[in-house]
Image (spheres, grey):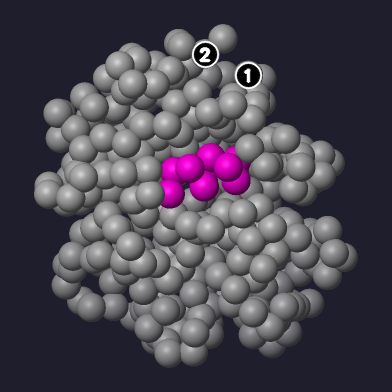
Amino acid sequence: MNRGCPLEQIVTRGVELGAYLGATLVVMQGQRVIADIAVGTVDGARRVSPNTLYDLASLTKPLATASVVSELLRSGDILLSQTVGEILGSDAGRLKSRTIHQLLTHTSGLLPHIPCYDYGLGLDAGVDAIVRSDSEPAGTIYRYSCLGYIVLAKIIKVITGQSVDVAARARCWDPLGLASLTFAQSGVVAPTRSLEGPEGHPVELIGIVHDGNARGIAAGGSGDVSGNAGCFGTARDVAAFGCAVLSGEWLGMPLSKRWLTDQSQPPGHSLALFAGANPLVPKGELFGDGAVGHSGYTGTAMLLVPEVDTVIALCTNAVYADKDAFLIHRKRIMNVIAGNLN
């Protein structure tokens, strides 16, 4: 699959339909690149290239935060069964009995979102707002929440003395050669538009994270970043990351299996990715429940399909165009990929 193939045609069709201005797509099967496509523009003028950086939004959760936590598991510095109270002490608030495992798998009972920036800027202020917020009892509901990963960012800082971006660079991205992944981007960056955040009004952003809570945390002036969003990168590096997980070459197969299979109770999430019958898995209509993956609100997605040894990385700035049209068209793209795999 490459130039002139059905996959390039369906990705280009997304531009024609107005789902996004441009896109990059990488499909790898084993260690073989079977598609590496860049179409359209980043802003109506500048052409997309394979090196175009996209705001990866919630792909930050697996690419950075869950990656660092996994490395801390490997080094014995943290346990999945440890509670927030054991690590943060009196700063844990209502979350003192919630575990690292529950935060990673979205079973901690936290709300999906609160505007942390309304309570102050910076990581400490954001976490303080979260630990005082309402929640359901842990383990009673699977509810996707950015808030748990913001708390994990503070846990990482307490344990390592480093912000998520610094820890991810040292423990994951550099060892894997993922040079484009960054929270401090330069080069050609696709713009986004955000309707919420600490500014109090809609803003157009280039090289600044789309997520409002992540912007509020970064605005705290202490060098902190959020654990739920803020990472930029290329589709090539997102795909390379997925291959490292799928092959077990980075984490080792026992831990990689925890990334590749449902690990939550109630079900719906692996240690880092949407899993099983969870409708949030960005798999289209043809891949089965063995596929795991994650999406980003800006218009990004990563899918790992163990049964065919395949990784898919799709990057767009659909939030700058038509996010609803993108979600529909993403299914078409995934279906075409599935229909052309051997």
Question: For the residue labelled by badge 2, is the local secondary structure a helix, a strand or a loop?
Answer: loop
Residue closest to the eye, 255 or 144: 255
Can residue 185 be seen in this snapshot?
yes
Q: How many marks?
A: 2
- Magenta-highlighted residues: 234-242
Q: Residue at x 16, y 72 (%)?
A: 201
Spot occupied by residue 2 in the image (x, y as percentages of width and height): 39, 21
In the rendered image, residue 311 lying in the magenta stretch gets the answer no
- Specify few, some or many for label 1: CA neighbours under 10 Å numbering under 14, 14-19, or 20 or more: some
**Amino acid type of disc 1?**
Val
Spot occupied by residue 34 in the image (x, y as percentages of width and height): 50, 23
Question: For the residue labelled by badge 1, is the local secondary structure a helix, a strand or a loop?
Answer: helix
Q: Compared with residue 96, is residue 283 higher up or lower down, i.e. above or below? A: above
Mark 2 and mark 1 residues within 8 Å of each other at the beta carbon: yes
**Amino acid type of disc 2?**
Leu
Can residue 268 be seen in this snapshot?
no
Q: Residue at x 44, y 26 (%)?
A: 35
Q: On the image, numbered disc 2 is attached to which residue?
A: 341
Q: On the image, numbered disc 1 is attached to which residue?
A: 308
**The N terminus, quarter of image:** top left
